[in-house]
Image (cartoon, rainbow, N blue to C red):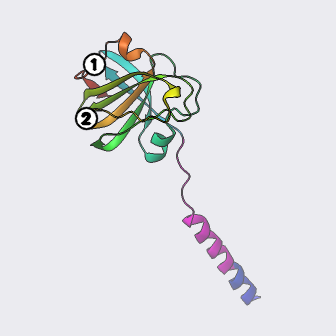
Amino acid sequence: MKKILIGLALIIVVLLLVVAKRPAAVQTVFNPGNVNLQGASIPVQVADNFHLREVGLSGRTSLDQGTGMLFIFERPATYGFWMKDMTFPIDIIWILNNKVVHVENSVDPSSYPKVFYPSSEANFVLELPSGYAMIHNIKIGDPFSVN
């Protein structure tokens, strides 16, 4: 009887170790945030890890007017964006040191597989509904902040 109990205890310990070693589930929920650009407060969904940045707006059917998606990177670089699995056009705005450094207006899904790059490094990228940048006169040098 003692050998059976020891055997069961070992099996339970092994199972607990296997469960504990499983990789954590990949986060697919975007955290809410808010940014300020050109005097407007814009609610955003935040993509601040590799998986969320990879998913982005892919597969969605729209982006509500006055909202966006903010991509946060650990260090400045010339991050390229494409329209893979996108179904609607967007504006793409690259930001460094809280200033707009590059704007791509009305990037269409049909542009895939073209990759859009900024003219200089950025540590934030903001995707907005197509036409937002033009309507709100977003231009290089405009101040940007995250709330």
Residue under pointer 2: 120
What residue lies at 29% left-to-right and 36% top-to-bottom? 122
Q: Amino acid at mark 2?
A: Ser
Q: Quadrant of the C terminus?
A: top left
Q: Position of residue 38 (x, y in %)?
A: 29, 16
For label 2, count other residues whose C-alpha is less than 10 Å away and answer few (under 14), some (14-19) or many (20+): some
Relative to residue 60, is residue 131 depicted above or below?
A: above
The quadrant holding residue 123 is top left
The picture places residue 72, in percent across and down from the top left corner, at: 36, 38
> How many neighbours does mark 1 have within 10 angstroms: few (below 14), some (14-19), or many (20 or more)?
some
Depicted 25 relative to depicted 31: above or below:
below
Q: Does the magenta segment cover residue 105?
A: no
> Element at badge 1?
loop
Let me know if residue 25 is in the magenta part: yes
- Magenta residues span 9-28
- The residue at 54%/23% (across/down) is 88
Magenta region, main secondary structure: helix
What numbered label is drawn on residue 20?
Answer: none
* Residue under the point 48% across and 42% down: 54
Of residue 94 and residue 39, the one placed in the foreground of this image is 94
Mark carried by residue 139: 1
Closer to viewer: mark 1 or mark 2: 2
| Callout 1–callout 2 Cβ contact below 8 Å | no
**On-image quarter of the N terminus:** bottom right
